[in-house]
Image (cartoon, coloured by chain):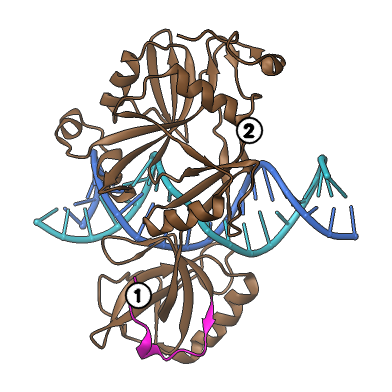
Chain colours: A brown, B blue, C cyan
Amino acid sequence: MINLPADISEKFRDKLNKKKQPDWISPMLAKLTHDVFSDAEWIFERKLDGERCLVFKKNGKVELMSRNQKELNNTYPELVRAFEEQDTDNFIADTEIVAFDGNVTSFRELQKRMHLKKKEAIESSKVKVFIYLFDLIYHDGYELDKLPLTERKKLLRELLDFEDPIRFTPHRNEKGKEFYQEACKKDWEGLIAKKANSTYAHSRSSNWLKFKCENQQEFVIVGYTKPQGTRKGFGAILIGFYKDDKLKYAGKVGTGYTDEMLEDLHSRFQKLEIDEPAVSGRLPSKNVHWLKPKMVAEVAFTEWTSTNKLRHPRYLGLRRDKKVKDVLKES
DNA sequence: TTCCGACAGTGGGGTCGCAAT
DNA sequence: ATTGCGACCCCACTATCGGAA
């Protein structure tokens, strides 16, 4: 058992604030970047594809809270139990709850579990969950926000027993680029890069960066939706790809456009309007205009979903060098 | 002067749970 | 039995504004 703050090296003593344990703290959020780097002043953690969770333990009582301050205790009773059994008390930890599909964390798998509310449904659920701890924000009367990240992680590792389902989130030093290559090869969601000496900010901060492994390919534009509210031009494009000479629907892409692009594309769509869809699949029916399959768009996304649609899609631009019939599903 | 953070507003896929059809 | 919708999860991105750099 370690005793705070006595075990923290002298130079960090002045960074500790004595404070009553809060019932809620806003989580630190990472910024997305497309600029992957290596840097000796940064550490790199595996990006876990699950549900963000803040763990509060106070006088033996455990509370799991979502990013939007919803209590998760009912959904994950086995995690609550695991924290109750820990000797350490009176702390706040930052975590991610995950489920696995093979060796990779799977949001798809976790979704079968995360919305369950009924006791029987949760007890009979086959989805096994784990909770990865990656930060310690408070312990035993002291706010740890102002300690450097690496000190907070050190304390975290010493304070708790890491036995399933409770797991520590390890990191690699310096070699972000190499680690990122490995991560994508292993089908991980990506990495989180963190400035090693940074404090815990209760907001989005550029001291935490997302390096996401992304997919990118062309799709045929087969329609678009009407704009809502103050939106210009159109809402989203509907896209498809060819399989066995037939156009298959692959979902919508509604972000990545400037106002100018929305208006320019919308004006190009006018000449291509048709009454019946040129694609097959489960198609949306409301507010949809169908188009002759003539235009090709480049789209980035994180992964294919179980129904062959794109997760986190965004528009990158038009491809004029590509024939529509050459647009196939690539990954 | 330029850059950056915070916010609102637009858009995506998916699940559960419940009400309406 | 099927469909639609809200409430939550996961988001990406643009536009705007005011203050920091």
Q: Quadrant of residue A5?
A: top right
**Residue type of the residue flagged with mark 1:** Glu
Q: Is residue B2 above or below residue A292?
A: above
Residue A133 appears anywhere in the view? yes
Q: Which residues are magenta?
A: A317-331
Assign the N terminus of chain A to one quadrant of the image.
top left
Query: Taking A258 as reference, is A309 left or right?
Result: left
**Magenta portion: prevailing SS class:** loop
Q: Position of residue A25 (x, y in %)?
A: 55, 26
From mark 2 to mark 1, how far is it between C-alphas? 40 Å
Picture coordinates of residue A180, whole percent (x, y): 49, 54
Q: Please give the name of the residue rendered at 15% of the width and 30% of the height, measured from the top-left corner.
A: A120
Mark 1 burial class by Cα count in 10 Å: few <14, some 14-19, many 20+: few
**Answer yes or no: do the residues labelled 2 and 1 have beta carbons within 8 Å?**
no
**Residue A230 circle label:** none
Whether A152 is among the magenta residues is: no
- Residue at (43% x, 53% y) in the render: A183
Residue type (three-letter) at the residue carrying disc 2? Ala
Point out the tag, 2 or 1, that comes first from the N-terminus: 2
- Chain ID of residue with mark 2: A
Residue occupied by mark 1? A330
Q: Which residue is mark 2?
A: A201
Residue A17 position, x and y percent, is: 66, 14
Quadrant of the drawing holding the C terminus of chain A: bottom left
- Residue A127 placed where, x, y %? 22, 40
Q: Give the chain letter at badge 1.
A: A
Q: Which sits in the foreground, A185 or A220?
A: A185
User: In the image, which is nearer the foreground, mark 2 or mark 1?
Assistant: 1
State the residue at coordinates (58%, 74%): A262
- Apparent side of residue C10 relative to residue A275 in the rendered image (left or right): right
Tell me, yes or no, whether dots 2 and 1 are on the same chain. yes
Q: Residues within 10 Å of mark 2 (few under 14, many from 20)?
A: some
